Image (cartoon, coloured by chain):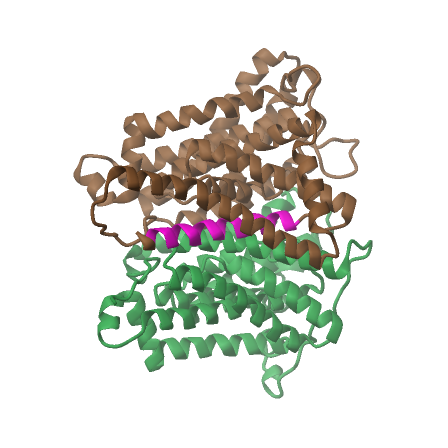
Chain colours: A brown, B green
C-alpha cells in the first residue's frame, strides 16, 4: 500500500509569484473553508438537538478562550495533540500510516504511573527525566512493533497499529485493576501520584512544563523534517521507495525510525497528560485522543506549525462541546462530527484546487 | 474456576454456537470489504459504517420491535456513509486511507450524537428484544452441526446467505469479472469498456450496506447500544479480508476463528464468575485482537503480499 496516491499532474510552467500566491491562498483558504463548513454542520446538529447555534458557539468560545483558566485548559489540552500530531506527520512522510497514537499514549501514561508510584521517595528533578525516558521508550516499543512488521514483513500497519491499541488498552485495564490499583477506589483506577511527581506549573495557572515540551518539539520536528538526513530520506521513501533504494537510502531503516519517533512522542504525550493534568491512571485516560491527534495532523496539513493551530482549534472544540453538553444538554459528540466534517472538507477542497491547476 | 465449563464435552456445542453468532457480523463486513478491495478500493471506513448501522438499527428495533427491519435500515445507513467515501475516493480520487479514517471518526461521532439525541442520558439504558433462534426443520436435528449451525437467529442465516451470494457474484458472474479486472488492471478494464468508477461505486455501496447490516447484527445479539459498541470489529473485518485472501468464503473461516476466540473469552469470564483467576481476564479479553494481529502477520508472511489486488488503494482517473 502506498501513501502517495494522487496521479502525477503535469502543469505548464507559470510565473513563480503567481504560483506562490495561489499556494498561499490554498494554505490559508482551505483550512478556513473547512472550519466554516465544519461549524455549519455543527450548527445543523445543534438545531436538531433543540439548541441555539449562536448561543452554543458563544459558550464554546467562552469555554476555550474566555479567561486565564480556560486558556490554561486549552494549552494543556493542546499539548498531547501537538506531540502526537507531530508523530503522525513524521510517520506519514515515510508512507507509514500509523493509527497507533492511542496505544503509544496509553502505554506512556501506564509507564509514568508505574515509575512514579514505585519510587520510594523522590524529587521531580530525578523522577521527571526517568519518566520521560521510560515513557518515550515504551511508546517507541509499541510504535516500533508496527514499524518492524511493516518494514521487514510487509504487514499492513493500519491493522497492526490498531490491534496494538486494543492490546495496550487491556493492559491498562489490568494495570488499574491489579498492580497499580488504588485499594480505596470504587472504580478501577490507580492511586494518585505523589505531589512531588506532578509537573511544575507556572504559579497560579494550570500551565505546566509539559506545555513547553510541546512548544519546543514543534521547531525541533520542523528542523528534523527539513534539515536532517533522516528528514530527507523519509520524504524520498514516502514518495517512492524504489527511488530511495536506488539512491542508497534504506527504506526499512527509515520506516522503523519514523515509527520509533512517532511512538516516543505519543509515549511522552501520555506521560505529560498523566503527571500534568490527570494525576491518576484510569480507563478514562484512553478516550479516543489518538484519533483526535490524527484529525489535528491532517487539518494542520502535516506541517509542524499548522499542527499547533489545528491543535488549538480541535482542543477548543473539545472543551467547548463539553461545556455545551453541561449547560445546554447538546451531546458533546457534535465536536467529533465537526472535526470529521472539517477533515473531509480539507480533503475535498485540496483535491478541487489540485484539479483546477 | 472449572475449565470443564468452558472446554468440557458438554460445553463445546454452546461454545461453537456462540462462536458462529459472534463471527457473523465480522464475516459479513469482511465479505463486503472483499468485493470493494477486489475492485481496487480500500473501504477503511467500515468501523464507522458499522457504528452508524448499529445505532440506526437500534432505534428502528426499539420503536418497531422488528429486528429484520433493523437489519434493513442498518444496511441503508451503512450505504449512505459509504456514499461519502465513494464521492471522495472514486469521484474525486482523494486518498482512500485518510478518507476512511475520517469516516470512522464521523460515524463514531454521529452514532453517539444520535443515541443521546433519541434516548437522552437515562439511568437505565434502553434495551431491545433481539431475534430469537429459529430451528430449521430437519437440519436442526442433526447431531452437533444442528445446534451449532441450524438453530441460529434468522439474521445469521440471512447474513451467511448474503456472504455466499457475494462470493457467487465475485467469482461466477460477468459483474464479478469486471470487479476483478478493475482491481487488477483498471487501465485494461477501461480499454475493454468496463467502467471502473461505476464498478467501484457498486462494490463500495455493497460493502457499506454489509457493514451497516453487520452493525445491526451486533446490537441484535447484545440488545443495547453504547459508544464504541462495535469494539473494533470493523477493523478486525479488514484484517479478516487479508486472512481470507480477498475471498468472501474465506472470510467465513477467518471470521469464525475470531468468533471462536471471542466466545472462548466470554465463556472464561462467565465461568470464572468475574472472580480472581490466576490468569487476569483482561488477557482473555485481549485475545481476539492478539489473534487477529498474529493471523494477519502469519498470512502476510506465508503468502507474501503479491496476492493482494494490484490496483488496491490507487485511484483511477479515466482518460477523457
Q: Nearer the viewer, residue A53 or A125?
A: A53
Residue depicted at x 69% and y 31% = A66
Between B294 and B241, the one nearer to me in the picture? B241
Question: Percent position (x, y) of residue B316?
Answer: 31, 62
The outermost residue toward the right is: B123
Residue A343 colored magenta?
yes
Please give left or right for residue A232 compared with residue B97 in the image.
left
User: Can residue B12 be seen here?
Assistant: no
Quick check: A347 left or right of B301? right
**Residue A318 at x, y percent in the picture:** 63, 41
Residue at 37 percent of width and 34 percent of height: A258
Residue B266, by quadrant, is: bottom right
Q: Nearer the viewer, residue A71 or B137?
A: A71
Q: Position of residue A232 (x, y in %)?
A: 28, 32
What segment carries the magenta color? Answer: A333-354
Q: Residue at x 35, y 30 (%)?
A: A225
**With B3 as the anchor, is B209 left or right in this view?**
left
The picture quadrant where one finds residue A145 is: top left
Amino acid at each position: 500500500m502506498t501513501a502517495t496516491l494522487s496521479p502525477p499532474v503535469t502543469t505548464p510552467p507559470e510565473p513563480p509569484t503567481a504560483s506562490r500566491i495561489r499556494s498561499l491562498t490554498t494554505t490559508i483558504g482551505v483550512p478556513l473553508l473547512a472550519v466554516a463548513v465544519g461549524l455549519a454542520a455543527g450548527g445543523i446538529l445543534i438545531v436538531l438537538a433543540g439548541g441555539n447555534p449562536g448561543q452554543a458557539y458563544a459558550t464554546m468560545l467562552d469555554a476555550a478562550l474566555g479567561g486565564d483558566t480556560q486558556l490554561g485548559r486549552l494549552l494543556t489540552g493542546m499539548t498531547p495533540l501537538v506531540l502526537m500530531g507531530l508523530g503522525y506527520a513524521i510517520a506519514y512522510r515515510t508512507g507509514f500510516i500509523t493509527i497507533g497514537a492511542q496505544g503509544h499514549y496509553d502505554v506512556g501514561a501506564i509507564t509514568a504511573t508505574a515509575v512514579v508510584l514505585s519510587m520510594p521517595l523522590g524529587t521531580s528533578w530525578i523522577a521527571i527525566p526517568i519518566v520521560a525516558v521510560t515513557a518515550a521508550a515504551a511508546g517507541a516499543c509499541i510504535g516500533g512493533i508496527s514499524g518492524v512488521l511493516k518494514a521487514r514483513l510487509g504487514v499492513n500497519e493500519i491493522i497492526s497499529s490498531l490491534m496494538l491499541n486494543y492490546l495496550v488498552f487491556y493492559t491498562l485495564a489490568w494495570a488499574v485493576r491489579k498492580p497499580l490499583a488504588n485499594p480505596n477506589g470504587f472504580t478501577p483506577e490507580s492511586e494518585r501520584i505523589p505531589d512531588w511527581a506532578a509537573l511544575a506549573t507556572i504559579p497560579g495557572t494550570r500551565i505546566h512544563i509539559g506545555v513547553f515540551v510541546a512548544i519546543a518539539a514543534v521547531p525541533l520536528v520542523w528542523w528534523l523534517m527539513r534539515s536532517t538526513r533522516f528528514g530527507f530520506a523519509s520524504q524520498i521513501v514516502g514518495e517512492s521507495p524504489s527511488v530511495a533504494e536506488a539512491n542508497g537510502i534504506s527504506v526499512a531503516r527509515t520506516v522503523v525510525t519514523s515509527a520509533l519517533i512517532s511512538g516516543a512522542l505519543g509515549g511522552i504525550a501520555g506521560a505529560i497528560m498523566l503527571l500534568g493534568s490527570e494525576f491518576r491512571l484510569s480507563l478514562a485516560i484512553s478516550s479516543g485522543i489518538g484519533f483526535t491527534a490524527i484529525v489535528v495532523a491532517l487539518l494542520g496539513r502535516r506541517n509542524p506549525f499548522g499542527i499547533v493551530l489545528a491543535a488549538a482549534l480541535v482542543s477548543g472544540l473539545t472543551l467547548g462541546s463539553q461545556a455545551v453538553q453541561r449547560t445546554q444538554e447538546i451531546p458533546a459528540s457534535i465536536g467529533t462530527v465537526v472535526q470529521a466534517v472539517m477533515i473531509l472538507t480539507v480533503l475535498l477542497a485540496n483535491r478541487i484546487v489540485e484539479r483546477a491547476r | 474456576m472449572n475449565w470443564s465449563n468452558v472446554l468440557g464435552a458438554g460445553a463445546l456445542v454452546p461454545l461453537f454456537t456462540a462462536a458462529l453468532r459472534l463471527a457473523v457480523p465480522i464475516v459479513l463486513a469482511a465479505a463486503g470489504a472483499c468485493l470493494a478491495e477486489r475492485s481496487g478500493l480500500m473501504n477503511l471506513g467500515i468501523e464507522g459504517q458499522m457504528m452508524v448501522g448499529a445505532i440506526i438499527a437500534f432505534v428502528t428495533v426499539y420503536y418497531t420491535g422488528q429486528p429484520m427491519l433493523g437489519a434493513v435500515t442498518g444496511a441503508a445507513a451503512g450505504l449512505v456513509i459509504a456514499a461519502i467515501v465513494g464521492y471522495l475516493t472514486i469521484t474525486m480520487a482523494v486518498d482512500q486511507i485518510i478518507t476512511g479514517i475520517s469516516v470512522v471518526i464521523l460515524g463514531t461521532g454521529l452514532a453517539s450524537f444520535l443515541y443521546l439525541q433519541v434516548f437522552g442520558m437515562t439511568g437505565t439504558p434502553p434495551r431491545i428484544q433481539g431475534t430469537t433462534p429459529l430451528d430449521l426443520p430437519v437440519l436442526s436435528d442433526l447431531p452437533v452441526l444442528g445446534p451449532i449451525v441450524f438453530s441460529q437467529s434468522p439474521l445469521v442465516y440471512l447474513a451467511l446467505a448474503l456472504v455466499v451470494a457475494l462470493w457467487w457474484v465475485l467469482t461466477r458472474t460477468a459483474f464479478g469479472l469486471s470487479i476483478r479486472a478493475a482491481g487488477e488492471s483498471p487501465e485494461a478494464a477501461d480499454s475493454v469498456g468496463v467502467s471502473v468508477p461505476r464498478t467501484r461505486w457498486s462494490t463500495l455501496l455493497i460493502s457499506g450496506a454489509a457493514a451497516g447490516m453487520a452493525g445491526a447484527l451486533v446490537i441484535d445479539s447484545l440488545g443495547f447500544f453504547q459508544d464504541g459498541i462495535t469494539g473494533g470489529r470493523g477493523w478486525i473485518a479488514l484484517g479478516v479480508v487479508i486472512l481470507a485472501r480477498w475471498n468472501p468464503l474465506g472470510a467465513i473461516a477467518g471470521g469464525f476463528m475470531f468468533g471462536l476466540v471471542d466466545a472462548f473469552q466470554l465463556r472464561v469470564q462467565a465461568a470464572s464468575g468475574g472472580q480472581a483467576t490466576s490468569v487476569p481476564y483482561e488477557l482473555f479479553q485481549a485475545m481476539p485482537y492478539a489473534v487477529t494481529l498474529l493471523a494477519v502477520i502469519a498470512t502476510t508472511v506465508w503468502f507474501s503480499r503479491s496476492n493482494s489486488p494490484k490496483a488496491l488503494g490507487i485511484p483511477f482517473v479515466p482518460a477523457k
